[in-house]
Image: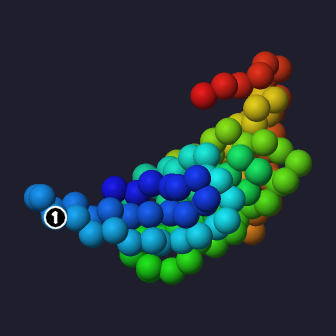
């Protein structure tokens, strides 16, 4: 079970029967607004409400890597664009849908749907 604390800490609980073990995986020091696994469950996208997207790879036990930093946008959520793990799609409060390259953080496309978005 992965979840985030208010302070921007990604926490993993390994639960087996009545026992559990807690591990702090990453501290990004920004409140995390959403967590999304890639289709093959090898990567986890961490999205902050300040417009930053991080990638965390559970199998590598490393730190979260900053992929995108668009401080001017208020991301509501991001998700992998399938097939594969090379692109993600995000949506902002103002209704802008964006497609990003996860290799270098390049904005590839955007579309304003003309309405405010809420989760």
Q: Secondary structure at mark 1?
A: strand
Q: Position of residue 105 (x, y in %)?
A: 76, 63
Number of residues whose C-alpha sits closer than 10 Å to that of mark 1, classed few (under 14), some (14–19) or many (20 or more):
few
Q: Position of residue 103 (x, y in %)?
A: 68, 68
Q: Is residue 48 above or below residue 92?
A: below
Residue indicated by mark 1: 19
Answer left or right for 18 relative to 117. left
- Residue in view at x 34 percent, y 56 percent: 1
Q: Position of residue 89 (x, y in %)?
A: 66, 45
Answer left or right for 101 relative to 108. left
Q: Position of residue 40 (x, y in %)?
A: 40, 58
Q: Is residue 40 visible?
A: no
Residue furthest toward the top?
115
- Residue in view at x 44 percent, y 80 percent: 60
Q: Nearer the viewer, residue 104 or 2?
A: 2
- Residue in view at x 85 percent, y 53 percent: 71
């Amino acid at each position: 079970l992965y979840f985030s604390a208010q302070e921007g800490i990604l926490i993993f609980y390994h639960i087996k029967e009545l026992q559990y073990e807690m591990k702090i995986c990453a501290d990004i020091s920004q409140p995390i607004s959403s967590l999304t696994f890639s289709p093959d469950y090898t990567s986890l996208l961490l999205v902050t409400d300040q417009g930053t997207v991080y990638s965390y790879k559970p199998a590598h036990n490393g730190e979260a890597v900053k992929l995108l930093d668009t401080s001017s946008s208020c991301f509501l959520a991001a998700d992998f664009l399938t097939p594969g793990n090379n692109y993600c799609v995000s949506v902002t409060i103002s209704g802008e849908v964006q497609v990003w390259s996860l290799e270098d953080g390049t904005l590839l496309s955007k579309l304003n749907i003309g309405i405010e978005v809420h989760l």
